[in-house]
Every structure is written in C-alpha cells, then in structure tokens.
Image: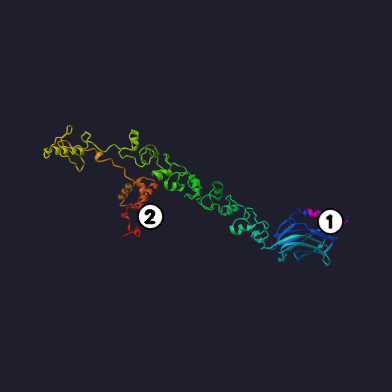
Amino acid sequence: MSSRNASWSGYALLMAFLLVSAGVAPIAAAAADGVEIRAIEHSGTGVVATENGRTYVTAWQPSSVSVVLVAEQGTYDVCIGTEGGDSTTSIDCQQIQATGSEQRATIDIAQWPMNSTGEQVLTVEVRPSTGGEPLAQASHPLFVLPAEGDIDGDSLGNQRELEHGTSIRVADTDNDGLEDGAEVNRFETDPTNTDTDGDELSDGVEVNEHGSNPTEVDTDGDGLEDGVEVTTYGSDPTTGDTDGDGLIDSEEVEQYQTDPTAADTDEDGLEDGPEVNIHETSPTAIDTDGDGLDDNEELTRYETNPTEVDTDGDGLEDGREVTVTNTNPNQGDTDGDGIGDGTEIQEGTDPNSAPGSGIDPLGVGVEPTIIVLIISLIALVGGGLALASGKVRLPEGISNWNAQRTDAENGRFVAAGQPQQTVGAQMRHPPEQPLSDEARIFNLLDQHDGQLRQSAVVDGTGWSKSKVSRVLSRMADEGDIKKINIGRENIVTRPDSVPEHAKSPFEDK
C-alpha cells in the first residue's frame, strides 16, 4: 500500500472518531507527502456547541483552535482563516518544529473579527516556514455568533442568552410556551424553568390561558395558589371572589365549604356572602334551622328568623304555623285571645279565632245596652212610672236597677241595692295585643331619648341583624325614623331627634 493510500485510510478512521467527540470538528483535508492534518479541535469559553458537523463559537469570547498534524522533521507555519460570502480573512499563524510524529499546534483567538461572523468555513493550511505552496489543507463549517445577533429569533440577543443560560439556537429553551426573550424582557420569568413561581401552572399557561402572574404563586392574593384554583376548584386565579358573592375564594373553600364558582351554593335564593355576613344562615343548607321553611322564604316572604325554629316562641315551628295551623309565625298569639298558639293547639282550641267579646252581666242573654232601651220603652208606654224614685217595673226575670251608670274609672255597671259587679275584662279590657315591630322600635327609642345605635336595636329586640335591617329600612322609607350613618354603624333616631349637625343642608329649617 502506498503511503498516500495509508494516509487516506488513517483519515477515514479519524473522521469516524471526530463525529462522536465533543469539540472535535470533522475536516475536509488535502495533504502532500510528509504532511497530514488529522484533526481540528475547538476549546475555550467561546465554544457553544458542535452539532451536525458545525461548530458554534461566540465572537466576543476567547476560544482556541488546535490543529493535530503529522509532518516530517522541519519547520512549518500552521495558519488559520475564515471564508464567508465573498470575503476571506486570515486569523493567525503559528510556527512549529516538526518531529516526524503526531503533534498539536494551538492558536488562541481573543475574539473573532467582526467580518467573520455568521456562517463561515474555517481553513487550515500548513506551509514550509521558508514560504511556498501549502503542503496540507483542511476546512470545516463554523458559525461565529455576534454579540448582538439573535440566531434563534426569540428577541433575546446571543450574548444575553449566554448570560441567562438559555440556548442560543432554541427560541423557547424550557419549552413552556413562552419564548426566551419574552420571559426575560416582559414577564421577568426564568427562561430555563417551566414553572417560575412553582404554583403548578407553567409560565406559558399562566400568561396565555389564565392571565395570572407567572412570578406570583397566588396572583389574586385570595389565599389559594393559582394552580390549585385552576386544577382543583375551577376558580379564577386573577379574582379573589370568583363568583362575586361577597366571600373570597379561600374562605369559601377552607372555612364555609361552599362553591367558590357559584354565588348561591345551596340554591336557596340567597347568595353565600349575605348568608354568612348578614343573615347568619348556613350557605350550604337550604333550611338552616330545619323548620320546614327555606331561608329565603323566611327572610323575604314570612319575615321570620331563618336561624330560629320557632321565631315567636309559641311552641309551634315556623314551618308548621305557615303550612299546617295557618297561624302567624311572628306572633305567639295569632288571634289575640291571650292564649298562645301552641297552647291552643295542645288544648284543641282554634288559634285563629278568639271567643266573643260581649258579656252578659245579668246572665239572661241580654246585653246591658238592650236592657236600657227596654226600660226606656216601658217608661214611655206606662207614663206613670216614677223614674224619680229610681224604681221601675221590669219584665219578669229582670231585677230592678237604679239608673245604670258607667264608672268612668273602671267601666263597671252598678245596680241599685246590689253589690257592684265588675264587667268581665274581656268586654271592657280586651286582651293586650302583642306589640308590632314598629311599636317595639318606638319603645326602644323612647327609652333612649329618641336615639340609639342600630346594634342596640339588635340587642334590645333579640331579632337577627337581617330583620332589624329590614324593619328599620321600612320605617325609614315611611318617614317614621331617620338612619344616620356614622363610620361603620347607623344611628337610629326619631325624625324630631336628629342632631343639628347631622341634618341635610337642604332640609327646611
């Protein structure tokens, strides 16, 4: 075998080695007898990668080119340069003393010439130091990256990509759906970390799908991490109160076990927020007190307390009063007969019908007024009756009466010569009716010189906050009272007790 054939055989083996060695570039070489270029190697900070037979180096960082060669004893110049487009640039040469065995010539490059950036071909030539034609030549593809260039088109310059540890040749290094430039320049996320804030949503998903902040674990500050909101509860990670019911999402999930995506979790017609903050009802139970009436019915239709089974305390549950006994769940004695509704039901009487109020003091089934009329008629017919004596003859079964009179003080009828008999209390003094809601408010105002706080009304009546609010609003609308807002509380007054400083400047003086 000729030495030339042996040389090419060795070169083929060398090429196979170079294809699997990092930083070693395959070369295209031509050699004369006695000189052979076996490899071209790149090393140093500026070497980015060798891929598909091409070496990528940065123009602004130092790197080295090492030429592995074998030459007969003598002095040689090893020179490198670049060819790109229509230009050829000489980089540098190094003189070596050949020993006849394999040796290495290394040329250090502080930075690549500006006219040698982009796609280039690195050329290597070995010449006799005395001059003359090249004895061996080799070349391989090279890409020189300029500092301000953007080879991958991700809006992040080559130099800045290296500073951030991103790939110069891949637009989205971490494959999170955001290009490196956008992550660095706009969103301030980590272009090498798919989930910058660690909330279990990738940066791209946060930005492109949910509008959440990829650098904040809890974008809306509601106490739930963005990832949990999206993947577990289906709530909006950018809105503290997803369903707008007055409860923030974390309160709904952690404290009340309500649905943060449904304003009315129990579908009783009351939003979760008002149930918790105003009515003090359960937002997860349609009938909080279990009295057979939905919370919404109690508040808006019957004006009963949805947290009390028996609003009026008469022994009958509100639901039973409404649906069975047809009594008033807000009045313990619906018919005003002095006997509570529960007692009447227990004793078998009708709680909706009071007994007759008329009373017969003589026991003959005749009202006193009728008796007086009869006496007057007899006097007129007889003509001779001695009314002055105070005696009259009455029909059988009716005793003589003096001129009947009414004691203005106690409402009693008095018969002549007879003990005073008191007319039944049911006729002259019907049972005391329960006070209306408005009357109770007026009583409280009178006890407090016409002014008191709304919270004092709650304490004084024992009503729920929601009922107090409804009653006071109704009375204010009708002009019976005034509500004055002071800070976070209302002051309730009679219209004539409003302090001067609280009156509207447009009211008549």
Looking at the image, which is closer to me, 481 or 191? 481
Q: Amino acid at mark 2?
A: Asn
N-terminal of the pair, mark 2 or mark 1, is 1
Residue at the extreme top: 396
Residue mark closest to the camera, 2 vs 1: 2
Q: How many marks?
A: 2
**Element at badge 2?**
strand
Helix, strand or loop for the magenta stretch, by majority: helix
Which residue is label 1 attached to? 8
- The quarter of the picture where residue 33 lies is bottom right
**What span is colored magenta in the figure?**
2-16
Looking at the image, which is closer to me, 187 or 1? 187
Indicate left or right for 16 with 237 as reference: right
140 in relation to 434, above or below: below
Looking at the image, which is closer to me, 18 or 239? 239
Residue shown at 40%/41% (left/top)? Answer: 308
Q: Residue 203, which numbered label?
A: none
Mark 2, other Cα within 10 Å: few <14 / some 14–19 / many ≥20: few
What's the CA distance linking mark 2 and mark 1?
100 Å
Q: How far across and down, in percent of the image, does residue 157 sit?
A: 65, 61
Residue shown at 25%/41% (left/top)? Answer: 429
Residue contact at pointers 2 and 1, CB within 8 angstroms: no
Q: Residue 485, which numbered label?
A: 2
